[in-house]
Image (cartoon, helix red, strand yellow):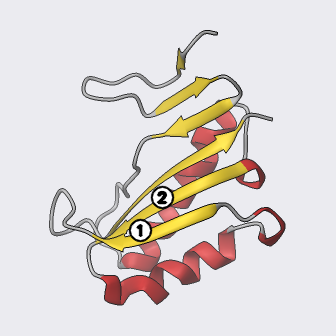
C-alpha cells in the first residue's frame, strides 16, 4: 500500500491518504483577527477543502481532535461545529484546552476520515 502525501510541507504533511483513510494535520485559521467562532468556521471550511482533495468529505469523518486556547470558548466553537457537522455522521471527538502556537490562535482542529 502506498502512502500518498497530498500536501507535503517543510515540517509536516497537511493531508495524507493511506489504506482508505485520510489524515489531516492540525489546522488553524489564517485570519486570526476573529473570535473562536470565526476561526472555527474558517478551519471547518479548510477541512472541507482538504477532505475533498483526498476524495472524502465530512460525512465520512472518523475522529476529530480539537484544541482550544481557552476552554471557556467551548460554546463558541460548538456553535460553528454544530452548524457544520452532519448529525447523521458524527465522528468520535475530543476537545481540550491547550497552549497553542501563539496568543492569537483560538482553536486548532485535526480530523481523520474514511476515503469515499
Would you place residue 65 above or below residue 96 in this image? above
Q: Residue at x 84, y 67 (%)?
A: 88
| Residue contact at pointers 2 and 1, CB within 8 angstroms | yes
Vertical placement of residue 27 versus 90, above or below? above
SS for dot 2 = helix
Residue 115's tag is: none
**Mark 1: which secondary structure?**
helix
Q: Where residue 17 sits: x, y (%)?
A: 59, 26
Image: 43 above or below 84: above
**Residue behind mark 2:** 43
Crowding around mark 2 (Cα neighbors within 10 Å: few <14, some 14 to 19, many 20+) is many
Image point (41%, 50%), residue name: 27
Mark 1 sits on what residue?
A: 39
- Residue at 35 percent across and 79 percent down: it is 35
Residue 86, percent across and down? Answer: 77, 66
| Pick the front one: 49 or 112 | 112
Give how far across and how far down residue 85 sits, in percent.
Answer: 69, 67
Image location of residue 20, percent across then percent down: 71, 27
Q: Quadrant of the C terminus?
A: top right
Left or right: 30 in relation to 110: left
Task: Bin the neighbour count of mark 1 within 10 Å (Cα to Cα): few under 14, some 14-19, many 20 and up.
Answer: many
Which residue is at a point 67% across and 77% down the rendered structure image?
Answer: 83
Amino acid at each position: 500500500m502506498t502512502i500518498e502525501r497530498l500536501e507535503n510541507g517543510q515540517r509536516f504533511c497537511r493531508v495524507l491518504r493511506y489504506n482508505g483513510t485520510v489524515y489531516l494535520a492540525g489546522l488553524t485559521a489564517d485570519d486570526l483577527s476573529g473570535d473562536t467562532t470565526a476561526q472555527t468556521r474558517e478551519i471547518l471550511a479548510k477541512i472541507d477543502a482538504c477532505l475533498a482533495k483526498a476524495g472524502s468529505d465530512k460525512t465520512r469523518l472518523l475522529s476529530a481532535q480539537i484544541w482550544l486556547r481557552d476552554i471557556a470558548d467551548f460554546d463558541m466553537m460548538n456553535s460553528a461545529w454544530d452548524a457544520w457537522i452532519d448529525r447523521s455522521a458524527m465522528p468520535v471527538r475530543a476537545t481540550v484546552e491547550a497552549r497553542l502556537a501563539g496568543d492569537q490562535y483560538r482553536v486548532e482542529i485535526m480530523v481523520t476520515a474514511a476515503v469515499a
